[in-house]
Image (cartoon, grey):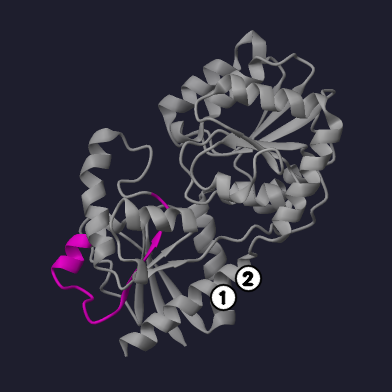
């Protein structure tokens, strides 16, 4: 039995890629001969005090754990990090990002193992942030959804040509406003947009999104679902025609992978890991970041060219079959930690 302390922050029930990654690993621990204790990082509490065979620190709280490492806490145990965001985080503002970034990097350099979620981001960690290649292991997230993949009972198109699904909490980084602008520019009968995700994570940005939704050019064209369970979300994937997300920074993009597994053509910016998940014109459409008109053109063609959309859908489903499952993720994660503890003696 390998005993693991997972140090993180925030609620494990949040609808984010990082917390979803954790939940699947916690669920798979017993089957992999592991016992995982989730430790919440606090301002004045040593999160390494309860550490067992190995300490795994989530990138959400790496900066806050660094002082304890510098003071020697938990030095006798191997230290690992799960890195699913750039040093400094996202959506924090320039000042916090500038202050947090060096702390994150200093912590990662003191880890014997850095687990990250894509080859794309692993290269960034080496080339941009100068981490050591031999300490980095890529363990991609799974793309399989639980439950019956049958669609929701009602017609998601709502009388229009296609139903477009976007799964994202309302952070500025996720590009919800840009997606709304692209939909508003289309003919009224083309797209019904479904937004799934928390609306309250950034109150200021959420207020801007709600104001935009009240405009006449989006009347009855957008359906809000809020935060959903994985089973509820799986039914939306099954009932939609297209997946769209105008996110500026995705180190992997679990929702993109889930959409591929559901056979949905993807529309998104040509940045982050998305160009390594899909090929433009094959499984979806890659648009230059910030090009709202290009986003609208891609959605317009998907709404009006049924044959092309069906071809992209079939290719997306084939690509989804090549992606790892959560069982594969657990194999890679626990295998990497077991190798670390064995090498550490």
Residue 68 lies in the magenta-colored region: yes
Residue 164, by quadrant, is top right
Q: Residue furthest left?
A: 71
**Bounds of the magenta segment:** 66-85
Q: What element carries label 1?
A: helix
Q: What element carries label 2?
A: helix
User: Which residue is tagged 2?
Assistant: 327
The reply to whether residue 225 is visible in this rendering is: no
Cα separation, mark 2 vs mark 1, equals 6 Å
Q: Residue furthest bottom?
A: 345
Residue 31 position, x and y percent, is 59, 80
Q: In this view, does 291 lie to the left or right of 82?
A: right
Look at the picture and state if 248 lies above or below 117. Answer: above
Q: Residue furthest top?
A: 216
Residue 166 position, x and y percent, is 63, 36
The reply to whether residue 256 is visible in this rendering is: yes
Look at the picture and state if 292 lies above or below 82. Answer: above
Residue 173 lies in the magenta-colored region: no
Q: Nearer the viewer, residue 101 or 133?
A: 133
Q: Residue 226 carries which label?
A: none
Residue at x-position 31% and y-position 59%: 41
Q: Residue 331 carries which label?
A: 1
Q: Nearer the viewer, residue 72 or 271?
A: 271
Residue 157, by quadrant, is top right
User: Label 1 crowding class (10 Å Cα cut-off): few <14, some 14-19, many 20+?
Assistant: some
Residue 322 position, x and y percent, is 69, 61
Residue 301, by quadrant, is top right
Q: Is residue 140 left or right of residue 231?
A: left
Q: Are marks 2 and 1 in contact (CB under 8 Å)?
A: yes
User: Label 2 crowding class (10 Å Cα cut-off): few <14, some 14-19, many 20+?
Assistant: some
Residue at x-position 50% and y-position 30%: 289
Q: In this view, does 4 lie to the left or right of 21?
A: left
């Amino acid at each position: 039995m390998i005993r693991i302390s997972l140090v993180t922050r925030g609620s494990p029930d949040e609808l984010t890629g990082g917390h979803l990654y954790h939940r699947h690993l916690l669920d798979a621990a017993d089957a992999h001969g592991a016992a995982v204790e989730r430790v919440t990082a606090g301002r004045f509490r040593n999160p390494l005090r309860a550490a067992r065979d190995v300490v795994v620190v989530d990138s959400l709280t790496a900066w806050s754990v660094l002082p304890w490492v510098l003071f020697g806490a938990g030095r006798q145990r191997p230290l690992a990090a799960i890195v699913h965001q750039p040093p400094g985080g996202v959506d924090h503002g320039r000042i916090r990002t500038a202050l947090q970034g060096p702390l994150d990097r200093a912590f990662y350099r003191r880890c014997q193992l850095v687990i990250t979620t894509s080859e794309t981001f692993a290269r960034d960690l080496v080339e941009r942030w100068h981490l050591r290649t031999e300490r980095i292991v890529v363990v991609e997230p799974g793309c399989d959804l639980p439950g019956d993949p049958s669609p929701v009972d009602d017609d998601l198109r709502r009388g229009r040509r296609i139903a477009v699904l976007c799964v994202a909490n309302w952070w500025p980084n996720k590009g919800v406003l840009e997606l709304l602008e692209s939909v508003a520019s289309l003919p009224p009968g083309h797209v019904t947009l479904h937004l799934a995700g928390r609306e309250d994570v950034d109150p200021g940005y959420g207020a801007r999104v709600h104001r935009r939704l009240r405009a006449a050019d989006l009347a009855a064209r957008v359906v809000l679902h809020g935060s959903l369970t994985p089973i509820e979300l799986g039914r939306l994937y099954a009932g939609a025609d297209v997946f769209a997300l105008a996110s500026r920074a995705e180190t992997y993009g679990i929702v993109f992978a889930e959409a591929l597994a559901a056979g949905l053509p993807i529309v998104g910016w040509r940045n982050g890991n998305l160009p390594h998940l899909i090929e433009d014109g094959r499984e979806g459409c890659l648009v230059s970041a910030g090009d709202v008109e290009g986003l609208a053109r891609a959605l317009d063609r998907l709404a009006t060219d049924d044959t092309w959309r069906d071809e992209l859908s079939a290719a997306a489903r084939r690509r989804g079959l090549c992606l790892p499952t959560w069982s594969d993720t657990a194999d890679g994660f626990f295998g990497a930690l077991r190798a670390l503890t064995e090498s550490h003696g």
